[in-house]
Image (tube, rainbow, N blue to C red):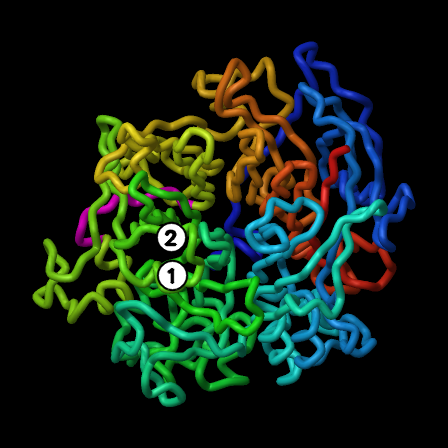
C-alpha cells in the first residue's frame, strides 16, 4: 500500500463516492456531526463494552459520509446482525511485563513489547495447528510504517525527521515489522491472551536469515554482515499471505523512505534509481540513516538490496528465525498469496505495487507435503519466478526469470541467478513484461481457481501507453482483472505458461454506469483504488479501497463474482478519517471477520491537531491503528 507520496495523502486515486441505498434510490437523512464518524466510530458513541473494549451490536448498516456528515443507508441484500469490537490497538501490551507508560512516550524497549504501528495485512490461524477452530487462534499482523507526528507529542508533520530524538527514532524501528498474538473468543467477544507462548514481535532490529539464490551474494554483503546471510529487521511490511503449511508470508513493499544518504556516487546507482531511490532525502523519511549508519547508503551501499523481499515467519514456532526467501524476487511486494497446482506444487502470486510495475508468479520445484510440515520448511527456496505479459487477445504469458535464459545473461549485466533476483525489475524489463497500474491485491479464488488482481490506479499513464490490461489514460480510480488458468482435468493449472484474462471492473461511478462492467441500478456503492481483497468461506469477495483524502474516504466492500448479482459492490463500512482498512481475514466458520484500520488521522498536523482520535476519542490523545473484529451471530 505504501509508496512515496501515497502515505502522505498525495498518492491516492481521486475518488468521489455516491451511495445508492437500494433499487428505489432512497437515501436516509444526512445527520451533521462535528467530526464525521465512520460506522466504527459509533462503537464508542453508543458506549457498549465488550472485554473492556468499545463494541456495538448493530443491525445491517452501511454509511456514506463527507468530512461533515454521516448518512445511514440500508444495503441490499442485508448483511445480517453482527457485533463489532476493537480487538487490539497500537501500543497494547502483549505481555504483562510491559511497563505502564504513556503511549506517546514509548521507549524502544517498550514498543518491542507491544502491538506495533499501522497494521496492514492480517490473518487468523486456528489453534491448535491443523484444526479448524474458529474461537481460538493466532492473529498475525504486518506493521507497515510509523507515523512519528502521531506517535510523539510535540512533533509535527512538517518537523519529521529533524525533530525526532535518537530514542524516538529507535522507537519507530521497534514499532514496525510483525506481531503474533494469541486470541480467544468467549461470550463477551474476542480477547488477546497476554503472556501467551505464541505472542511475538518481529521488528526493525530482529535478526532475519536470507535463503535462496541471493543469500550470501556479493551485493548482499555489508560491513556488519560479511557473509550476506543475516539482516537486522524488516520494515514496510504491507500485504502478505499464508502458505499451505501455516506459515505467514510478509511482503516488504519498499525501502526508499527508510534509507537515505548521498547516492550520487553509489556503485549501483542505476539499480537504486530503478528501485525509486533518490538523493533528495539524505535523512530518510524517518531519520533512520542518522541514527544507524547501516541505513546510510553512502556508508553501506548494499543495504538497500537486503530489503524488498518476502519474509516467511512461522507463528506456531516462536523460536523459529524469520527468513527472507530471495527466490521470490525483490520488488515492492504487495502480498504473496498461495495456491496449489494440480501436481501439488505451490504457486505464489505477487504484485509490484508501483505505477508501471509488474505482476509476478512463483512456482516451487517440489510439491507440498500435507503429511509432513517440516518437509515444507524450505520449499520456497527452489522454483521459478515469472512475470506476466498481457496480450491484446485476452491471454497472459508467464515468462520465467532464469539466469542464462533469453536476455538474462552476463552480456546484460547479470552474474548469476542471485543477481537476476536482486535486480528483478530490470530482468522483467528485458523480458518485455506488461507495465501495470499499481498491482495491489492479488488473490486466487479458492472456489473457482480464478485469480483476481486489483490495480489501484496510475495517473501518470498517457494515452500512448494504454494497453488492453490497463485500458485508461490517467487512471485515477483503478480497476479489477480476472485471470483464468487452463483446466488440467484435475483442476485449474496455476503452473501453466498461459492463462486467459479479462477486465472485470473499471472503478468509478461514471465509468461503471457507462461501460456495462457494473450496472448501477442494483448497487449501494462505488469503490475506488481497490487494494486488499479476500474471499469469505461462502465465496464472496471483500475489497478494501486505498485512495484516502482525494475524493472520498476509504472503506470495505462486498462483491459476488458469480450469479445474477455478480460484480455489484455493496458498501459495508467506511474507515475513520484519514485511514484505510486492510485485510480482511476470516475465521474458518466465517462468523468473525477481522479488519485492520491503519493510519487514522494521518493527514493531521500533529497529535494536538488530530482530525480524529479514533478509536478511543480521548481529548489530547492520538488516534491508534487497530484491528476490528466483526462477529455475526
Q: Is residue 197 left or right of residue 464?
A: right
Q: Is residue 491 above or below residue 568?
A: below
In this orientation, which residue lies closer to the viewer: 410 or 385? 385
In this orientation, which residue lies closer to the viewer: 204 or 459? 204
Q: Which residue is mark 1?
A: 375
Q: Quadrant of the C terminus?
A: top right
State the count of labels: 2
Q: Is residue 607 above or below residue 282?
A: above
* Residue depicted at x 55% and y 22%: 568
- Mark 1 is surrounded, within 10 Å at the Cα level, by few (under 14), some (14 to 19) or many (20 or more) other residues, namely few
Q: Is residue 525 magenta?
A: no
Q: Is residue 432 magenta?
A: yes
Residue 369 is tagged as 2
* Residue depicted at x 43% and y 69%: 323
What's drawn in magenta, residue-wise? Answer: 429-439
Q: In the rendered image, which quarter is residue 83 located in?
A: top right
Q: In what element is the residue under mark 1? A: helix
Q: Is residue 55 left or right of residue 203?
A: right
> Percent x, y for residue 595?
65, 46
Residue at mark 1 to residue at mark 2: CA–CA distance: 7 Å
* Residue depicted at x 25% and y 35%: 396
Amino acid at each position: 500500500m505504501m509508496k512515496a507520496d501515497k502515505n502522505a495523502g498525495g498518492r491516492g486515486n481521486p475518488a468521489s463516492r455516491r451511495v445508492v441505498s437500494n433499487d428505489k434510490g432512497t437515501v436516509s437523512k444526512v445527520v451533521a456531526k462535528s467530526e464525521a464518524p465512520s460506522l466504527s466510530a459509533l462503537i464508542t458513541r453508543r458506549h457498549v463494552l465488550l472485554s473492556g473494549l468499545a463494541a456495538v451490536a448493530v443491525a445491517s448498516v452501511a454509511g456514506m459520509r463527507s468530512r461533515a456528515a454521516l448518512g445511514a443507508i440500508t444495503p441490499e441484500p442485508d448483511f445480517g446482525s453482527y457485533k463489532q469490537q476493537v480487538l487490539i490497538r497500537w501500543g497494547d501490551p502483549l505481555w504483562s511485563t510491559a511497563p505502564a507508560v504513556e503511549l506517546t512516550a514509548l521507549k524502544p524497549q517498550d514498543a518491542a513489547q507491544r502491538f506495533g504501528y499501522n497494521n496492514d495485512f492480517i490473518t487468523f490461524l486456528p489453534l491448535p495447528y491443523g484444526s479448524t477452530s474458529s474461537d481460538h487462534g493466532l492473529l498475525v499482523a504486518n506493521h507497515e510504517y510509523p507515523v512519528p507526528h502521531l506517535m510523539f507529542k510535540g512533533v509535527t508533520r512538517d518537523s519529521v525527521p529533524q525533530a525526532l530524538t535518537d530514542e524516538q527514532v529507535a522507537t519507530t524501528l521497534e514499532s514496525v515489522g510483525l506481531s503474533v498474538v494469541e486470541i480467544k473468543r468467549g461470550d463477551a467477544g474476542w480477547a488477546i491472551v497476554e503472556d501467551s507462548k505464541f505472542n511475538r514481535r518481529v521488528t526493525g532490529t530482529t535478526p532475519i536469515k536470507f535463503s535462496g539464490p541471493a543469500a550470501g551474494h556479493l551485493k548482499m554483503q555489508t560491513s556488519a554482515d560479511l557473509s550476506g546471510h543475516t539482516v537486522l529487521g524488516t520494515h514496510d511490511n504491507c500485504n502478505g499471505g499464508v502458505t499451505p503449511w501455516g506459515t505467514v508470508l510478509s511482503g516488504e513493499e519498499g525501502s526508499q523512505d527508510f534509507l537515505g544518504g548521498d547516492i550520487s556516487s553509489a556503485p549501483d546507482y542505476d539499480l537504486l534509481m530503478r528501485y525509486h531511490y533518490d538523493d533528495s532525502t539524505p535523512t530518510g523519511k524517518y531519520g533512520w540513516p542518522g541514527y544507524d549508519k547501516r541505513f546510510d547508503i553512502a556508508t553501506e551501499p548494499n543495504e538497500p538490496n537486503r530489503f524488498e523481499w518476502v519474509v516467511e515467519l512461522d507463528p506456531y514456532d516462536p523460536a523459529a528465525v524469520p527468513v527472507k526467501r530471495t527466490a521470490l524476487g525483490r520488488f515492492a511486494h504487495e502480498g504473496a498469496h498461495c495456491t496449489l497446482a494440480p501436481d501439488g506444487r505451490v504457486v505464489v502470486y505477487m504484485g509490484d505495487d508501483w505505477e508501471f510495475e509488474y505482476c509476478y508468479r512463483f512456482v516451487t520445484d517440489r510439491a507440498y507435503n500435507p503429511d509432513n510440515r517440516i518437509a515444507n520448511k524450505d520449499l520456497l527456496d527452489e522454483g521459478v519466478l515469472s512475470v506476466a505479459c498481457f496480450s491484446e487477445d485476452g491471454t497472459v504469458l508467464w515468462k520465467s526469470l532464469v539466469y542464462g535464459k533469453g536476455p538474462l545473461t552476463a552480456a546484460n549485466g547479470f552474474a548469476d541467478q542471485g543477481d537476476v533476483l536482486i535486480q528483478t525489475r530490470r530482468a522483467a524489463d528485458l523480458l518485455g513484461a506488461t507495465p501495470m497500474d499499481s498491482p495491489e491485491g492479488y488473490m486466487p479464488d479458492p472456489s473457482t481457481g480464478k485469480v483476481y488482481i486489483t490495480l489501484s490506479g496510475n495517473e501518470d499513464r498517457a494515452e500512448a501507453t494504454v494497453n488492453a490490461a490497463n485500458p485508461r489514460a490517467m487512471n485515477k480510480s483503478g480497476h479489477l482483472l480476472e485471470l483464468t488458468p487452463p483446466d488440467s482435468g484435475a483442476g485449474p493449472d496455476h503452473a501453466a505458461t498461459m492463462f486467459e484474462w479479462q477486465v472485470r471492473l473499471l472503478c468509478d461511478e461514471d465509468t461503471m454506469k457507462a461501460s456495462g462492467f457494473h450496472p448501477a441500478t442494483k448497487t449501494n456503492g462505488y469503490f475506488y483504488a481497490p487494494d486488499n481483497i479476500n474471499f469469505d468461506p461462502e465465496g464472496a469477495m471483500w475489497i478494501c479501497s486505498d485512495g484516502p483524502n482525494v475524493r472520498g474516504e476509504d472503506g470495505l466492500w462486498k462483491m459476488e463474482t458469480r450469479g445474477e448479482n455478480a460484480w455489484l459492490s455493496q458498501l459495508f463500512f467506511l474507515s475513520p478519517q484519514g485511514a484505510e482498512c486492510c485485510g480482511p481475514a476470516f475465521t474458518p466458520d466465517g462468523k468473525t471477520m477481522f479488519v485492520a484500520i491503519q493510519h487514522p488521522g494521518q493527514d493531521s498536523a500533529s497529535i494536538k491537531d488530530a482530525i480524529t482520535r479514533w478509536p478511543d476519542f480521548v481529548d489530547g490523545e492520538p488516534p491508534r491503528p487497530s484491528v476490528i473484529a466483526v462477529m455475526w451471530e
